[in-house]
Image: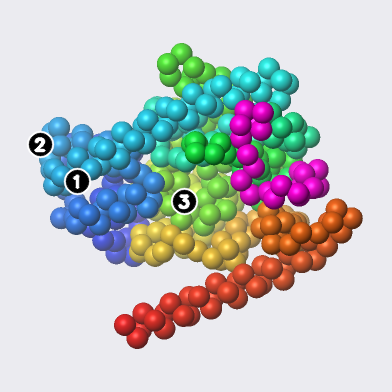
Amino acid sequence: MKKDAAMLPAVSAEMELLCACASPTGVRALAAGSFRPRRVDGARFRTLATNHHVIPMVYRAVKAAAQNNIDLLPVEFLECLQRDYLAIAAHNLRATAILHRLQSLMESKGVRLVPIKGPVLAVLAYGSTSLRQFEDLDWIVAGEEVLRAVALLEQEGYVAREIPPGANRSRYAASRQEWSMHKPGKTPHVDLKPALISHALADRRATEYMVGACRSIALGDGRACFAPGPEAMLLAVCMDGANEMWAKLSSVADAAALLSNVAGADWAGLLREAGRLGQKRSLLTGVLVAQQVLGCMLPEAFHKDAEEDPAAGRLAKAAAGRMLAERSLRTGAARRAGYALRTRERFRDRVRFLSRSLFVAGAADLNQISLPDAWYPLYSCFRPFRLAWDAARGRARRIVAAEASSRA
């Protein structure tokens, strides 16, 4: 299904080519020469591809076109893209080896780590770990096992990135927020998630669904891991998009690739599960963004539900329009939270989202003020004021920047 030109803004030549490179059908059209984009600014195009985390897909498309004597970019930019792609592919190989080793290690200690996104999504959506750009390794871990997982990672040389050393770990773990761990001087980082994507977006049932959807997935080079299949992975992609306001084209490309490249997927079953979990609007918004931005064909299973939820269509249109108009990738926390809130289709989930967003103390709160353990509940009282102060400071900085720009 093609993009509805009446709904979406006019796009630049660079964004038009970027979308073609990220679209399953666009890649084939570029390689065959059936789609000839307008002349692009090579430097601007490379910057867009970098910012949207789609370098591997761009390099694949531009290289395939060049092999058919179709020059989409000057040769010097193709060489730059090749260097970028090779660096990303090397990073992904290291990350895949670490993923396999850590899952095996944790399993031997009785802790189950379930990988989401990262190399597994690359294999499911694109058939190769090298064709998806990612930075961290994201893992789902049961809430009761998170402290054991953190301790085992610390034995491996990892350090908590955001939690202050003196924080009460048991209380923080009880809030079901993620733990970001890193090895000093090494990549990738590791994020442990007791809740799927966000503790405010999802409850325990979503985590249990992802664990139950796991199967053995081949990663290449004889390696395999235990991870969710394509249906569950699409839900994770769409929930992540809702959480981030669909800021990057890479997330849209992931959704489009899963919808287009996975044969025999049970999308109707996924819709039923998403409805049970209160995540159907996030899912519908994601597939509609993929349709509107990349021209992705919507599987039949989604048509009726999409028509019955106009709010999902409005959310998708807002995200698609913002992306194609190339508005800033940076959005304030309040705007992102407002967008995510609108993806909650049930009243009780909206209440839960607001209460957890406003009153569950996060790492920033623990770092900003140090309270004795007996006073830990006061962090929940302090958090709304910190959020308001941060929002006010952010607005003040934007006003100052705008005034400076106008004077220039």
- The three-letter amino acid code for the residue at tag 3 is Leu
First to last magenta residue range:
153-173
| In this view, the mark in front (1 or 2) | 1
**Where in the figure is residue 3, as x and y percent of width and height?**
34, 54
Report the Cα–Cα distance between label 3 and label 1. Answer: 32 Å
Residue at point 40%, 59% (across, down): 323
Q: Which residue is mark 3?
A: 288
Residue at point 81%, 43% (across, down): 170
Q: Which residue is mark 2?
A: 69
Which callout, 1 or 2, points at the residue further toward the start of the chain?
2
- The three-letter amino acid code for the residue at tag 1 is Phe
Q: 190 or 129, which is in the foreground?
A: 190
Q: Kindly state the secondary structure of the residue where label 3 is placed.
A: helix
Badge count = 3
**Where in the figure is residue 153, as x and y percent of width and height?**
65, 31
Report the Cα–Cα distance between label 1 and label 2. Answer: 16 Å
Quadrant in the picture for the C terminus? bottom left
Which callout, 2 or 3, points at the residue further toward the start of the chain?
2
Which callout, 3 or 1, points at the residue further toward the start of the chain?
1
Q: Which residue is mark 1?
A: 77
Q: Kindly state the secondary structure of the residue where label 2 is placed.
A: loop
- The three-letter amino acid code for the residue at tag 2 is Asn
